[in-house]
Amino acid sequence: MFQSLKRLALALPLAALSLGAVAVAASPAAAQLFDPETATLDNGMEVVVITNDRLPVVTHMVWYRVGGADEPRGKSGIAHFLEHLLFKGTTNAPEGEFSDAIRRVGGSENAFTSYDYTAYFQNVPVSALEEMMRYEADRMVNLDIDESDIGPERDVILEERRSRVDNNPAALFREQVQAATYLHYPYRIPLIGWKHEMERLGLRDALDFYDRWYTPSNAILVVAGDVTLADVLPLAEKTYGQIPARAVPPRERSVEPPQLAERRLEMTSDQVAQPSFSRRYLAPGYNWGDTEHAYPLQILAEVLSGGATGRLYRSLVVEQKIAASAGAWYSPDGVGPSGFGFYGSPRPGGDIGAVEAAIDAEIATLLADGVTQEEVDRAIARVTAAAVYARDGVSGPARIFGLALATGQTVEDVEAWPARIAEVTAEQVNAAARAVFRQDQSVTGILRPAPVTDRQEG
């Protein structure tokens, strides 16, 4: 499966919510709730263990620091394609054996590809952990595929594109908006790939990508559940530790040039029932640009879009009654440029122009008057309260640390999130808004129903 870097439906991105999961109170002590244990194998593979003894289960994850933004030019979709091919079997375990072993113990598995990472995981009883590590270490180096595997699996992902993107006007339009958001940075290319390039992906493309990036020094092992580092490390050394060290090349990412002109896209479709508005601004994140704005922007997203109490929903939906939905989102995670976005849709029969004008007015008011410290304090409380529950699970903490380490953060950054969020001031939020909400680095999108006269009869 593939996942978009931007999640328009969320008021806060996964990274913000998941990093917020370490917080119960805004104090240095609260920042140590996960208290992970870490180690590094001799071959360079990082190991993170988050102990949770509530249930005798574990989430076992391997994250690779490679994703769609690392693909060779003209090979879009190869990262996601290779993710599929890794389920084809190895020289030691034929196709299906690994999955059968997971099913026998009542476990589950999956994988996902993003722009900056690819991850594989299993949720299993603690007793099955060593077996999972053995199988996962095996497919890190012993993938066994040939030409007979390529065509059928390529057809699978082409059908995935047809069903998820090509037959969905909203998805097609998001793809166009994404491409317009970045002038040169590879986030502009669809994760699943452009169809004409996907159709040409071959065996050599997959093997070259595998040989280049799938190695212990480019991987992070994250285990969360009823185990400690003392339990996990000997197993990791016995499995992953036996793989020889091999260096990986540096990530070759293009540099996003200055954006000097706002962009506007409009699209109509007879499959669209209700128009929608979106606006994206290029924004710094944890690892790119003016990173000091990342935490204030997370709070700003909550002020604007914190459910029924957020500024946008309260103004457009409750008070003005011109919108069926309205909100904002921000994604700070990622190696490259992030984005801050707004969205809205009118009530049935309503005017999309009125929704756009109302959101523009809210942005103008924000830039002129700013937010108050009281709003910021309430947003901090809501973010930490909403996120706290993730620490009680098993898979959530594993994803938190895997995502952070795969995109350039550290364990210390994750643990410090509550304290850093608690220190955000209204002045910082207002400075971040002024730095980011610039029309010359924005993309506005309007998706409309086709006029009645243009719709097919039948």
Image: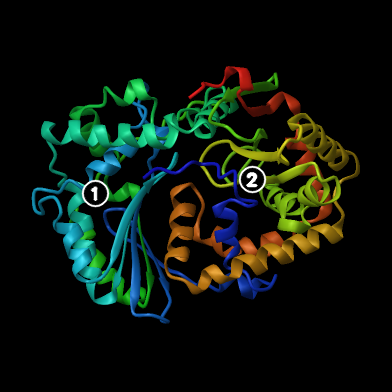
Amino acid on which the number 1 mark rests in the picture = Ala
The single residue placed furthest to the right in the displayed view is 369
Q: Which residue is mark 2?
A: 330
Lateral position of residue 299 relative to residue 151, left or right: right
Residue 103 makes an appearance in the image: yes
Q: Going by the image, does 98 lie left or right of 72?
A: left
Question: Tag 2 or tag 1, which sits nearer the N-term?
Answer: 1
Q: Quadrant of residue 285?
A: top right
Q: Which mark is residue 245?
A: 1
Q: Secondary structure at mark 1?
A: loop
What is the CA distance from the residue labelled 1 to the residue labelled 2?
A: 37 Å
Question: Residue 232: where, in percent of width, then height?
Answer: 30, 71
Q: Residue at x 21, y 27 (%)?
A: 202
Q: Is residue 420 above or below residue 366?
A: below
Q: Quadrant of the N terminus?
A: top left
Q: Return the residue found at the far front.
A: 458
- Residue 391 percent location from the top left of the image: 52, 71
Side of 405 relative to 105 (left or right) = right
Give residue 29's position: percent from left, percent from top: 63, 75
Report crowding for label 1: few under 14, some 14 to 19, many 20 or more residues within 10 A (C-alpha).
some
What residue is rendered at 49% in x and 26% in y? 254
Above or below for 247 versus 426: above
Residue 127: image location, x then y, percent: 24, 76
Which residue is at the front of the view, 353 or 417?
353
